[in-house]
Image (spheres, helix red, strand yellow):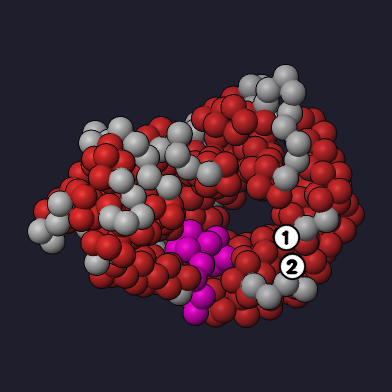
């Protein structure tokens, strides 16, 4: 039955419950024939008529439009609010449960806007819990089933999250494809804040795929679009992604300038959560671009680690911060401290994406080699190797195999080291 048919049916049901005839309901503002047409679904009442009928029937307008009483509506909105708060506070498991409870409420089916928000929130909470497969399924279902009713802004937000999940999972082909369906046409749509944010996800996928020439070209296009739009958050996003491209291609001065601009712009905004995440990213780039100043970056990462524990940052972001702290300690030749930090990372490793697990295991392998625990380092390498073998051939995977080769050489395993070098080259088609 169509939406207007359902409205007419509700009007008819409530009218009969009130003991009114069509003529009594219509008088004096409407004709009984017009009420009859509405109830049969042959006429769509205007908002003003709907409001009038709700008043005459002594029921809520929400019920006539959506089949949900005012009390049900209030309860759904309240529960949705609790889910948002849990997500903002970093209680991602709680948020996942609360979003699922909202969707289990029968009343939400008649409230497409709130249902879409709950489904999108559930997908983000699922991603934050490390369940990328589950998040991808939810996002694809939402994108497919609600394509005709959701706003363009919501659609772009879903594709941003979907591309990010595919990239974290290592499926770079899909990470690129879902974005290029929007941005990759013969005529690119006019840039907006949302589309630039989508573009940064595409750029991240290009970087992971090792397409550095396209990355530098696209980064320049995004920077120009952001400056033209003038939105501070958009400028911060694009400078940050440009910093990653510059660092990955060895342009360290550029990387530093872009990263500092991104951080400076974001510092002027009243969003401590985003600022904390950007500081984490900034310190990661600085470790790569300015390794000689690792002591300063280490101090910053230690402070940030404490802040993230009290924030709404996802488990993945907290894990990345800890891993960067390990790298800083290794650069400072402090393997014992690095070993303490990597053990903390291991405590939250279960359920994380396969690529992130492989990265953390290789970091532990490197740390164990540095403290002279060669046998344990080799054991950890075997665990990391199992994860690496199942990863797609990407630039990141090549870096991990290269690290493995260097560690194996250090613990006097030249044959295995040579094999790791060959695997690293194979990842970049060499």
From the image, tell me which residue sits under label 2: 266
Boundaries of the magenta span: 310-323
User: As rendered, which of 35 and 294 lies closer to the eye?
Assistant: 35
- For marks 2 and 1, the one nearer the N-term is 1
Give the percent coordinates (x, y) of residue 143. Answer: 44, 37
Quadrant occupied by the N terminus: top left
Looking at the image, do the residues carrying marks 2 and 1 touch, with CB atoms under 8 Å apart? Answer: yes
Which secondary structure lies at badge 2? helix
Residue in the picture at 45% in, 63% down: 315
Q: Is residue 169 visible?
A: no
Q: Position of residue 427 (x, y in %)?
A: 59, 28
Q: Which residue is mark 1?
A: 233
Quarter of the figure with residue 376:
bottom left
Badge 1 marks a residue whose secondary structure is helix
In the rendered view, tell whether residue 41 sits above or below residue 297: above
Q: Residue at 48% across / 50% down in the picture? A: 356
């Amino acid at each position: 039955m169509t939406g207007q048919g359902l409205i007419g049916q509700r009007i008819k049901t409530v009218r009969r419950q009130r003991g009114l005839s069509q003529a009594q309901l219509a008088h004096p503002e409407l004709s009984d024939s017009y009420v009859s047409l509405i109830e049969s679904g042959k006429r769509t009442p205007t908002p003003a008529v709907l409001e009038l009928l709700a008043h005459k029937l002594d029921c809520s307008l929400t019920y006539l439009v959506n089949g949900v009483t005012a009390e049900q509506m209030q309860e759904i909105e309240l529960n949705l609010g609790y889910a948002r708060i849990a997500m903002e506070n970093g209680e991602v498991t709680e948020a996942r449960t609360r979003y699922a409870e909202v969707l289990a409420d029968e009343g939400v089916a008649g409230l497409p806007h709130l249902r879409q928000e709950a489904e999108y929130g559930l997908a983000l909470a699922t991603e934050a819990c490390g369940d990328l497969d589950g998040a991808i399924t939810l996002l694809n279902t939402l994108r497919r089933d609600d394509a005709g009713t959701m706003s363009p802004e919501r659609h772009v937000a879903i594709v941003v999250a979907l591309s990010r999940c595919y990239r974290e999972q290592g499926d770079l082909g899909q990470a690129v494809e879902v974005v290029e369906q929007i941005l990759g046409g013969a005529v690119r749509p006019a840039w907006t804040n949302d589309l630039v944010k989508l573009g940064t996800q595409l750029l991240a996928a290009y970087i992971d795929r090792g397409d550095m020439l396209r990355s530098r070209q696209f980064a320049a296009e995004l920077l120009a679009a952001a400056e033209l739009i003038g939105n501070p958050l958009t400028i911060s996003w694009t400078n940050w992604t440009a910093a990653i491209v510059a660092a990955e291609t060895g342009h360290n001065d550029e990387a530093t300038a872009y990263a500092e601009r991104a951080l400076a712009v974001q510092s002027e905004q009243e969003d401590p959560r985003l600022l904390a995440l950007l500081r984490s990213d900034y310190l990661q780039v600085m470790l790569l671009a300015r390794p000689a100043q690792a002591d300063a970056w280490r101090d910053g990462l230690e402070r940030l680690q404490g802040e993230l524990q009290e924030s709404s940052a996802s488990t993945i972001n907290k894990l990345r911060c800890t891993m960067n702290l390990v790298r800083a300690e290794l650069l400072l030749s402090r393997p014992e401290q690095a070993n303490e930090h990597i053990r903390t990372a291991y405590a939250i490793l279960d359920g994380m994406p396969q690529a992130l697990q492989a990265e953390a295991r290789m970091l532990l392998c490197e740390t164990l080699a540095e403290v002279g625990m060669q046998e344990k380092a080799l054991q950890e390498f075997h665990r990391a190797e199992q994860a690496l073998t199942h990863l797609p051939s990407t630039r990141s995977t090549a870096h991990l195999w290269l690290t493995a080769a260097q560690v194996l050489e250090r613990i006097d395993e030249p044959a295995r080291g040579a094999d790791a070098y060959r695997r690293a080259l194979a990842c970049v088609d060499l």
